[in-house]
Image (cartoon, rainbow, N blue to C red):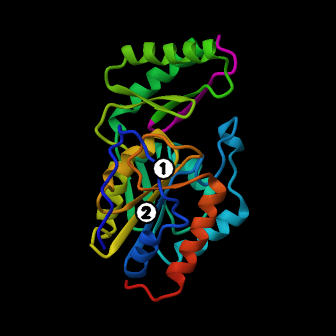
Amino acid sequence: MTQQPPIPANSASPLLPSALDSSTLARQLETKRPAVFLDYDGTLTPIMARPELALLDEAVRHTLAALAKRCPVAVVSGRDRSDVQRLVDIDGLIYAGSHGFDISGPGLQTEHGAAYLPNLDDAETELRRSLNHIRGALLERKRYSLAVHVRGLPPNAALAAEAAVDAALSHHAHLRKGTGKMVFELLPRLDWHKGHAVLHILEALRLSAADVLPIYVGDDRTDEDAFAALAGRGAGILVAESPRPTAAYYTLRDPDEVHRFLKRLVDAVGSRDLPS
């Protein structure tokens, strides 16, 4: 099956076809084994005001568990791996936390950036002091990153929080800045992101064959690295209510549509015997 040409991540985004209605994707699934990668916040759950409020619906958990019995399923999140693993709470899945710096699953255990933990510790101390006067700014320490959440903050407060992140970054040359939906992060200055993590998982689990269709579903800027990494070999699915520049091939509007898509995947791969 001929793949659609990838859409450059910095291009103007046309209206993408829905993953729920794509005949091309349906035909690919008739002959290929899916390997499914999913972001968590904004993809499996709605974006919430605070990270701890984003709880996985039991119906979605049931669908994920059913899908994991038929094909490899990985959750690739900016959250700490232990956090997203606790929230999803399904055995047999692969969990990649801190944007892929910490990966664990059946037959797979990988961490990148352990040498940068002291740098993150020092930056955390500095940021807690500088953010103390910004009411509503939330600093979340993950094993391999520091996240400053600014959701719900007035524009001036959000700008002040970003300035604090930039100031900390200027004092820690071994760290780099990441951005997402209403969040700024400090991460190890390594050439590693969700796209590299997905390719690593595919290779480690011997899922790089031509008869495997990697499917990545995500909503955030950090997911663009995974969409780009899979261009020409997989299906990137952007979760968004309106068009935006993306390297994805397909779209779903919201987590409810993601759940509908996952249920269709269960039906598609459950209706035939898949090669091992």
Write down the quadrant of residue 89 in the picture: bottom right
Q: Residue at x 61, y 12 (%)?
A: 156
Compare residues 125 and 188 and report the one nearer the observer. 188
**182 versus 172 height, above or below:** below
Could you tell me if residue 101 is visible in this image? no
**Residue matched to label 1:** 15
Decide: is 211 above or below 176: below
Does residue 212 appear left or right of residue 221 in this picture?
left
The residue stretch that appears in magenta: 133-144
Residue 205 lies in quadrant: bottom left
Does residue 268 lie above or below 233 as drawn? Answer: below
Mark 1 neighbour density, 10 Å: few (under 14) some (14–19) many (20 or more):
few
The residue that mark 2 highlights is 215
Q: Dot 2 surroundings within 10 Å: few (below 14), some, or many (20 or more)?
A: many
All told, the count of numbered labels is 2
Identify the residue at horizontal 30%, vertical 36% (top origin): 190
Look at 56% across and 76% down and name the residue there: 266
Q: Secondary structure at mark 2?
A: strand
Q: Position of residue 215 (x, y in %)?
A: 43, 62
Residue type, mark 1 in image: Leu
Asked if residue 215 is among those painted magenta in the image, a careful observer would answer no
